[in-house]
Image (spheres, rainbow, N blue to C red):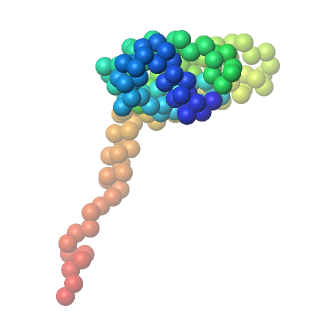
Amino acid sequence: MSSPCIYEHVKNAVQEAHGDYGRACLARSFRVKYVNPVTGVAFIGCGRDNYRMLWSSITFIKKIQNKRCMCRVLHVGGTLRSCQKFVIRHNKEQLLQLLEQCKTPGEQRKVAKAIDKAEKYEMSLDPIEVMKRKASAKKSYSKPSLEEFDTD
């Protein structure tokens, strides 16, 4: 599962569901921003005016690369960051459910480690944490004064 493959399947689904009009509406703004073949999650972007058309078309996709699939929209967001945050929370919830189903201590340790990693990554996307990192980076960088460049 790759970005070009997803792009073609979604584009064809829009064509089938909404015809030339749908394809033309999405022609400029439609893009596949991210695909994770392991989790089966993809970030698909389009203009605000056309997201419902894209959404309705995605539900009709039944096969990708001759493999049966069920496509569903997990989240609609205005920014890539909001989508990233959602996916991290969603994956964490899935891992917590998986943790309950673990049978051996080894499996539990692996899943718990993945949950910890997800929590750390979620914190790294927190806007307050981002502002703190930017502020500390500005403090550590000092502008050179004109006196330092004074040449006689």
Q: Nearer the viewer, residue 22 or 88?
A: 22
* Residue 82 in view (yes/no): no
> Whole-percent x and y of residue 121?
52, 33
> Whole-percent x and y of residue 76?
41, 18
Give residue 56's quadrant in the image: top left
Report whether 134 appears left or right of 96. Answer: left
Report whether 74 appears left or right of 146. Answer: right
Residue ranking furthest to the bottom: 152
Give residue 50's quadrant in the image: top left
* Residue 145 in view (yes/no): yes
Q: Tell me what residue is drawn at x 47 percent, y 33 percent.
A: 33
> Whole-percent x and y of residue 151?
21, 84
Q: Nearer the viewer, residue 97 or 37?
A: 37
How many numbered dots are placed on residues in this image? Answer: 0
Q: Nearer the viewer, residue 19 or 44?
A: 19
Report whether 103 appears left or right of 129. Answer: right
Q: Nearer the viewer, residue 81 or 14?
A: 14
Task: Say if 62 sits above or below 132 in the image.
Answer: above
Q: Tell me what residue is drawn at x 37 percent, y 24 percent.
A: 24
Query: For the N terminus, which image quadrant?
Result: top right
Query: For the C terminus, which image quadrant?
Result: bottom left
> Whole-percent x and y of residue 107?
76, 23
Residue ranking furthest to the right: 104
Task: Say if 149 sits above or below 43 in the image.
Answer: below
Q: Tell me what residue is drawn at x 56 percent, y 15 percent.
A: 61
